[in-house]
Image: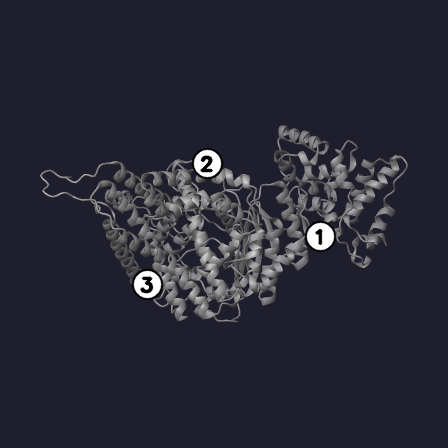
C-alpha cells in the first residue's frame, strides 16, 4: 500500500471512531491535505492540529503535543457535552465536579477507652491542669472532659426525643428471666445437674447463647405487636407532611461511594434513581455525586465514560458529578469525609447510597421532609428491601428479608427509638453535625483491632447521638432497595469484613459519652459473630461431656465423708422440652411473619400456600447453612484476634455462580469434619447421633448446598413455581424495571485499551486526569514505559503498566497519538483501531446529523 493511501486510511478510520456528521467529516477532510509523501504519523499530527484549530479558544488548544491540543475539540465535536476548562498547567480539564467550598472535618482523639483509667486520671488531675479549647470559626468549644454539641445542638423535647428507658428495662428483664429459666432447665438435663466443672462451663456457654437468641425473639415479638396494631406513636414518618414543599435552601447531596464495582449496574441504578427524582418534581433540590475509590485501570476508564453517557442521556451535566480520589485513605468513610470537606457547606443534607442501591424520588423527598419536620434528627435510616437477584441463594435471602425483616426492624425501632442503627447506606444525614462530630479518629493501641476504623456506620451513629442528635429508623418507608450477595461464599466474604469491623468497634463500648443503647449496639455487633465460636465451643464441650461420661467410670462419691452416692441422671423428656423451647424462640418469629402476610394479603408472595411452603423450605435451608456459617465465622473471629491477613474488596454485583472446584476448596474441610464428628459420636453412643445430625449432616452436605444454591436456573425454577416470590418480583416498582432496562440497553464498557485507542474515550480520560510535574528520573521511566506499551500486546499489559499512563493525561494523549501514528504498533492494537466504531458505543459516538448543530460545519462554511 502506498504511503499516502495508508495515511488516508488511517485518518478515515480515526474519523469513523470520532463519529462526526457527514457534513462535518467532509469539511475536515477538505481541509486536511494528504500528499503523495505524507506518512500516517504526519497525517495524524496534522489532523489533531486541525481539530485544535477549529476551536482555537478551547482549553489546552495551544499544547505542544497535537493529541493533547485536540482534547477539548474531540470532546466538543463528538457531542460528549461535558464542559472543559483549563487547569494551572494549561491542559484541558473536565468539569466533572462542583467548585470547591471547603469545610473543616477534624477527628477528635478517643482518649482512654478504659473507664478505670479515665477515673484514675480524673482523680489525679488537678483543676489548674484543665485547659478548655477555645472557639474557632470551624468548631465550637470542646472541653477537655467530654464532647458537647455546639451551636447546632438540637432543642430536644420529650415528644421528639422520647425516653425508651422503661421499654428497654422490660426487654432486659424478659431476656434475663427467660435465660435464667432456660439455664436452670439445662442444669436438670446434665448428668450431674450442673455440679461438675465441665458442666459449669457448658452452662455458661449455654446461658450466653440463649440470652442472645432471647434478645432476637423479644425484638421480633415487639415488632409483631407494632405491625399487628398498625400504629406506632413514636414512628418518625408520622411527622412528615406529604406533598409539602421542600425549602429552597434545604439542598441535598446524593452520594454514591464506589470502588471497582460493576460500572454498568452502578450507573443503571443511579440513572433509575435520578429519573425517579425528576418525575417527583423536586430535582432542583438534589445533586448527585459518584465518589470513586477505584484502582483498576479498566474500571476507571469505564466509570468516566459511563458518567458522560449518563449525563448525556438525562441532561445531567451540572447536576451529576464524578470524582475519583488518588489518595484512598480510610476506605468508604474516608471517601465520604473527603466529600464533606470539599462540598458539605453547599448542602444541608446528604443521602448515602451503596453501589447497588436504588431509591425512588418519593422516598428521597420524604426523607428530606422528615428531616425538616424533625430538626433534632441527625440520621434517618430506611429499611432497604432486597431485590434484583436470580440465584436460588439470593432469592431465599430476598424472601427472608422481605418476610421476616419488617418484624425485626419494627422491633428495633420499638426498643431503640431515637438511638437506633445506621447501616451506612440508604439513609439521610444532617451534614452540619456530621461534619462537626462524626470524623473518625483511629482506635488507640496496637494489633489488628486498633488503627483505622473499618465498619464506620455504627460508630458514626453513636457519635451523632453522643452529640445530642437523634438516629432513627423509618422502617415503613417504601422505595428503598438494595441487592443481596448472589451466593453463600460471596456473602461470607462480606461477613469477614463486617466481623473484623464489629470486633474493632467493641473497643468503643466504654468510650466516654456514648449512649447506653449504642453501647448495646456495639455489643450486639460483636455477638453477631462471636456467637459462632461460642456455639462451636458449646458443641465441642457437649461432645466432650458425652465422651467423659461414656469412657470414664461414673463417680458416685465426690466429697469426703459423703454418706449417699450421686447418681448420674438422664432426663430425655426435659432435654426435648428445652429443645422445643429453643426452637420456638428461633422459629416463632418466622411463623408470625407469615401470619401477618396472611392477614394483610399474600398476593404479592404468590398466595397463602406458596408463602407458607416457602417459609418451610427456608427453615430447612437456614438449618443446613447455620453450621457452615458457624465454622466460617469462628475462623473470621480467630483471624481478627490473631491479626491474620484480611482482604477488603467490593462484593460482586452480578449473579455469579459457585464452581464445584471452588466449593471443594472452601467446604472440603467442613465435609471431613462432619463425617469425623458424626462417626465419633456414633462410636461413643449411637443414641446421641440424631441430636448431632443437624450439625454433622449439614457439614457433610455443605459442598452441594453451596454449589446448587448459587444456580440461577434453580432460582428461576422456584420463581416459576411462585416460591420465594416477593412483591418486588411479582410487580416490580418502576425504578427496578428501569434499572434492568438500562442494564440491558447499555453498551459494553471501555477499558484501558479503548481509553488509549478511541478518540472520545481518550479525550475524556485525558481531561479527567491532572498533569503533575515529575522528576527527571521518573519522567525518563515513564517515557520508557510509553515505548513498551504501544509495542506490547494490549491483552498482556499489567496493572503496573496501565495505571501510570491512565493517571498522566500527557502520556495518555501521547500514547493515543503513537498508536495511530507509529508503524511498529503491536498487531492487536492495530486490530482494535481497524474495527469500525459502533453508533452509541461510547459517549458521544452518535453524531448529530444536522449540520447546523455541528461546529465543524459552521467553521467550514
Q: Is residue 137 visible?
A: no
Residue 674 position, x and y percent, is 41, 41
Which quarter of the rendered picture does the N terminus lie within?
top right
Marks 2 and 1, how far apart at CA? 44 Å
Element type where label 2 sits in the image: loop
Q: Is residue 710 visible?
A: yes
For the residue pair 717 and 730, the one nearer the viewer reads as 717
Marks 3 and 1, how far apart at CA? 55 Å
Element type where label 1 sits in the image: loop
Quarter-wise, where is residue 48 in the image?
top right
In-image side of 475 versus 17 (left or right): left
In-image side of 192 versus 145 (left or right): left
Instruction: Determine the residue positioned at 56% across, 59% down.
Output: 719
Q: Nearer the viewer, mark 2 or mark 3?
A: 2
* Residue to which mark 2 is pinned: 645
Q: Tell me if mark 3 has few (under 14), some (14-19) or many (20+) residues whose alpha carbon lies within 10 angstroms of its own.
A: some
Q: Nearer the viewer, mark 2 or mark 1?
A: 2
For the residue pair 62 and 254, the one nearer the viewer reads as 254
Residue 284 in the image: above or below residue 773:
below
* Residue to which mark 3 is pinned: 163
Residue 828 in the image: above or below residue 299:
above
Element type where label 3 sits in the image: loop
Residue 95 position, x and y percent, is 64, 51
Instruction: Determine the residue positioned at 77% across, 50% down.
Output: 19
Mark sitting earlier along the chain (2/1): 1
* Residue to which mark 1 is pinned: 80
Mark sitting earlier along the chain (3/1): 1
Amino acid at each position: 500500500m502506498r504511503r499516502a493511501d495508508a495515511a488516508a486510511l488511517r485518518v478515515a478510520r480515526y474519523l469513523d471512531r470520532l463519529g462526526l456528521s457527514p457534513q462535518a467529516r467532509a469539511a475536515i477532510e477538505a481541509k486536511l491535505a494528504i500528499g503523495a509523501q505524507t506518512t500516517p504519523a504526519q497525517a495524524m499530527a496534522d489532523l489533531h492540529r486541525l481539530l485544535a484549530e477549529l476551536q482555537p479558544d478551547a482549553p489546552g488548544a495551544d499544547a505542544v503535543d497535537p493529541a493533547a491540543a485536540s482534547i477539548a475539540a474531540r470532546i466538543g465535536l463528538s457531542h460528549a457535552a461535558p464542559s472543559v476548562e483549563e487547569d494551572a498547567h494549561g491542559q484541558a480539564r473536565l468539569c466533572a465536579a462542583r467548585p470547591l467550598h471547603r469545610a473543616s472535618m477534624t477527628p477528635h482523639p478517643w482518649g482512654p477507652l478504659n473507664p478505670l483509667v479515665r477515673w484514675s486520671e480524673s482523680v489525679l488531675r488537678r483543676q489548674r491542669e484543665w485547659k478548655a479549647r477555645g472557639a474557632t470559626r470551624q468548631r465550637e468549644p470542646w472541653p477537655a472532659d467530654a464532647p458537647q454539641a455546639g451551636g447546632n445542638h438540637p432543642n430536644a423535647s420529650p415528644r421528639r426525643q422520647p425516653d425508651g428507658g422503661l421499654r428497654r428495662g422490660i426487654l432486659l428483664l424478659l431476656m434475663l428471666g427467660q435465660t435464667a429459666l432456660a439455664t436452670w432447665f439445662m442444669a436438670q438435663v446434665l448428668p450431674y445437674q450442673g455440679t461438675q466443672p465441665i458442666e459449669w462451663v457448658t452452662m455458661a456457654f449455654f446461658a450466653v447463647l440463649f440470652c442472645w437468641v432471647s434478645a432476637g425473639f423479644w425484638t421480633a415479638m415487639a415488632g409483631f405487636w407494632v405491625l399487628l396494631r398498625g400504629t406506632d406513636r413514636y414512628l418518625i414518618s408520622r411527622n412528615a407532611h406529604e406533598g409539602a414543599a421542600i425549602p429552597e435552601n434545604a439542598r441535598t447531596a446524593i452520594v454514591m461511594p464506589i470502588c471497582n464495582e460493576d460500572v454498568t449496574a452502578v450507573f443503571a441504578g443511579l440513572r433509575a434513581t435520578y429519573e425517579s427524582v425528576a418525575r417527583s418534581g423536586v430535582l432542583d433540590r438534589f445533586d448527585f455525586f459518584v465518589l470513586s475509590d477505584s484502582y483498576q485501570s479498566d474500571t476507571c476508564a469505564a466509570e468516566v465514560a459511563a458518567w458522560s453517557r449518563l449525563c448525556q442521556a438525562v441532561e445531567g451535566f451540572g447536576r451529576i458529578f464524578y470524582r475519583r480520589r488518588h489518595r484512598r485513605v480510610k476506605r468508604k468513610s474516608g471517601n465520604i469525609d473527603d466529600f464533606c470537606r470539599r462540598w458539605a457547606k453547599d448542602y444541608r443534607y446528604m443521602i448515602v447510597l451503596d453501589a447497588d442501591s436504588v431509591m425512588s424520588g418519593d422516598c428521597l423527598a420524604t426523607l428530606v421532609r422528615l428531616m425538616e419536620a424533625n430538626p433534632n434528627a441527625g440520621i434517618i435510616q430506611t429499611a432497604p428491601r432486597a431485590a434484583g437477584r436470580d440465584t436460588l441463594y439470593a432469592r431465599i435471602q430476598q424472601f427472608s428479608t422481605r418476610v421476616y425483616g419488617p418484624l425485626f426492624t419494627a422491633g428495633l425501632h420499638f426498643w431503640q427509638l431515637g438511638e437506633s442503627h445506621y447501616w451506612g447506606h440508604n439513609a439521610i444525614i444532617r451534614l452540619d453535625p456530621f461534619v462537626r462530630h462524626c470524623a473518625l479518629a483511629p482506635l488507640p493501641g496496637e494489633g489488628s483491632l486498633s488503627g483505622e476504623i473499618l465498619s464506620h456506620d455504627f460508630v458514626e451513629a453513636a457519635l451523632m447521638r453522643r452529640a445530642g442528635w437523634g438516629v432513627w429508623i423509618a422502617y415503613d418507608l417504601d422505595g428503598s432497595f438494595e441487592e443481596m450477595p448472589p451466593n453463600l461464599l460471596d456473602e461470607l466474604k462480606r461477613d469477614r469484613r463486617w466481623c473484623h469491623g464489629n470486633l474493632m468497634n467493641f473497643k468503643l463500648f466504654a468510650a466516654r459519652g456514648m449512649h447506653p443503647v449504642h453501647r448495646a449496639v456495639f455489643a450486639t455487633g460483636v455477638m453477631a459473630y462471636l456467637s459462632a465460636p461460642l456455639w462451636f465451643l458449646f458443641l465441642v464441650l457437649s461432645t466432650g461431656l458425652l465422651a467423659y461420661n461414656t469412657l470414664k467410670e461414673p463417680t458416685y462419691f465426690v466429697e469426703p465423708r459423703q454418706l449417699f452416692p450421686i447418681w448420674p441422671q438422664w432426663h430425655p423428656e426435659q432435654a426435648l422440652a428445652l429443645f422445643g423451647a429453643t426452637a420456638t424462640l428461633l422459629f416463632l418469629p418466622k411463623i408470625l411473619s407469615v401470619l401477618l402476610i396472611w392477614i394483610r394479603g399474600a398476593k404479592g408472595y404468590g398466595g397463602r400456600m406458596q408463602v407458607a411452603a416457602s417459609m418451610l423450605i427456608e427453615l430447612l435451608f437456614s438449618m443446613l447453612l447455620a453450621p457452615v456459617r458457624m465454622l466460617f465465622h469462628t475462623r473470621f473471629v480467630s483471624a481478627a484476634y490473631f491479626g491474620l491477613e484480611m482482604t477488603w474488596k467490593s462484593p460482586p454485583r452480578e449473579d455469579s455462580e459457585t464452581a464445584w472446584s471452588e466449593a471443594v476448596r472452601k467446604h472440603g474441610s467442613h465435609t471431613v469434619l462432619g463425617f469425623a464428628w458424626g462417626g465419633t459420636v456414633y462410636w461413643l453412643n449411637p443414641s446421641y447421633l440424631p441430636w448431632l445430625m443437624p450439625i454433622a449432616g449439614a457439614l457433610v452436605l455443605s459442598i452441594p448446598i453451596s454449589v446448587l444454591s448459587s444456580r440461577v436456573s434453580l432460582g428461576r425454577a422456584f420463581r416459576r413455581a411462585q416460591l420465594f416470590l416477593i412483591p418486588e418480583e411479582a410487580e416490580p416498582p418502576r425504578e427496578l424495571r428501569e434499572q434492568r432496562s438500562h442494564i440491558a440497553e447499555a453498551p459494553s464498557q471501555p477499558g484501558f485499551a479503548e481509553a488509549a485507542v478511541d478518540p472520545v474515550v481518550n479525550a475524556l480520560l485525558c481531561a479527567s486526569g491532572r498533569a503533575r510535574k515529575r522528576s527527571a528520573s521518573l519522567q525518563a521511566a515513564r517515557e520508557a514505559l510509553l515505548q513498551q506499551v504501544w509495542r506490547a500486546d494490549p491483552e498482556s499489559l499489567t496493572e503496573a503498566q496501565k495505571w501510570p499512563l491512565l493517571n498522566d493525561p500527557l502520556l495518555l494523549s501521547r500514547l493515543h497519538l503513537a498508536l495511530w501514528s507509529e508503524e511498529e504498533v503491536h498487531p492487536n492494537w492495530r486490530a482494535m483501531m481497524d474495527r469500525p466504531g459502533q453508533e452509541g458505543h461510547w459517549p458521544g459516538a452518535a453524531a448529530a446529523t444536522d449540520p447546523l448543530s455541528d461546529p465543524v460545519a459552521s467553521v467550514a462554511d
